[in-house]
Amino acid sequence: MTSLTRTASTIVVAGLVAGTIDIGAACAINSLDPVVILHAIASGLIGKPAFTGGMPSAALGLALQWAMSMLIAAIYLGVTAAHPARRRRWVTTGILAGIVIFAVMNYLVVPLSAAPFRPRLTVHGLLTAFTAGKLIANLLAMILFGLIVGYCARERG
């Protein structure tokens, strides 16, 4: 297997596994059905109509989730490329990646999206986007996401 093929395979596997588990985590954290979570993801692109779009909107949400997850895995590989030995310390780098993913998604991507539930792009809006419990649960979910990506990439170093 060529290096490019191994890298692409790592990105796809890490993205699919982490992205799918992330949907499950969102369901558990919010006590919602997976289709509602997928509609919420799709709403980041198409806004409120995603919630009345049925299965096509849910499929769009799933495609977006997996695409974002693969992009995150590719970024992780790119960031760690200069020091691939750090990938073998996948727990540490996975936790750090999870914290960065949490911050970027919740304080940049979601506020700039078309999602109707996005926080206001103000200091107060961003600081009060979560209750303490939801903040911890979402942060832990993103750390799990980072750990999955780190684990999948561990032998690439």
Image: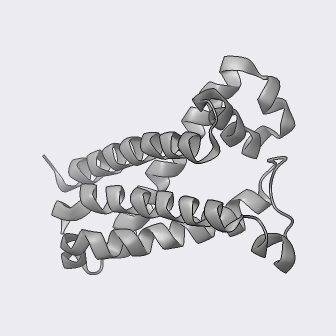
Q: How many marks?
A: 0
Instruction: Please identify the quadrant where the C terminus is shown.
Output: bottom left
From where the camera sits, is residue 137 visible? yes
- In the orientation shown, which residue stands out farthest toward the top? 55
- In the orientation shown, which residue stands out farthest toward the front? 133
Residue in the image at 16% along x and 50% along y: 2
Residue in the image at 23% along x and 47% along y: 5
Residue in the image at 31% along x and 76% along y: 92
Residue in the image at 87% along x and 65% along y: 120
From where the camera sits, is residue 81 visible? no
Question: Of residues 25 and 16, which is closer to you in this image?
Answer: 25
Q: Quadrant of residue 126?
A: bottom right
Q: Is residue 92 left or right of residue 141?
A: left
- The spot of residue 68 in percent (x, y) is 54, 50
- The spot of residue 150 in percent (x, y) is 30, 63
Look at the picture and state if 56 lies above or below 151.
above
- The spot of residue 127 in percent (x, y) is 76, 75
Look at the picture and state if 38 lies above or below 108.
above
Question: Of residues 122 and 129, which is closer to you in this image?
Answer: 129
State the scheme by which the image is colored. one colour
- The spot of residue 69 in percent (x, y) is 48, 50
Look at the picture and state if 21 lies above or below 144.
above
Q: Is residue 3 left or right of residue 52?
A: left
Q: Quadrant of residue 46?
A: top right
Look at the picture and state if 9 lies above or below 32.
below
- In the orientation shown, which residue stands out farthest toward the left? 1
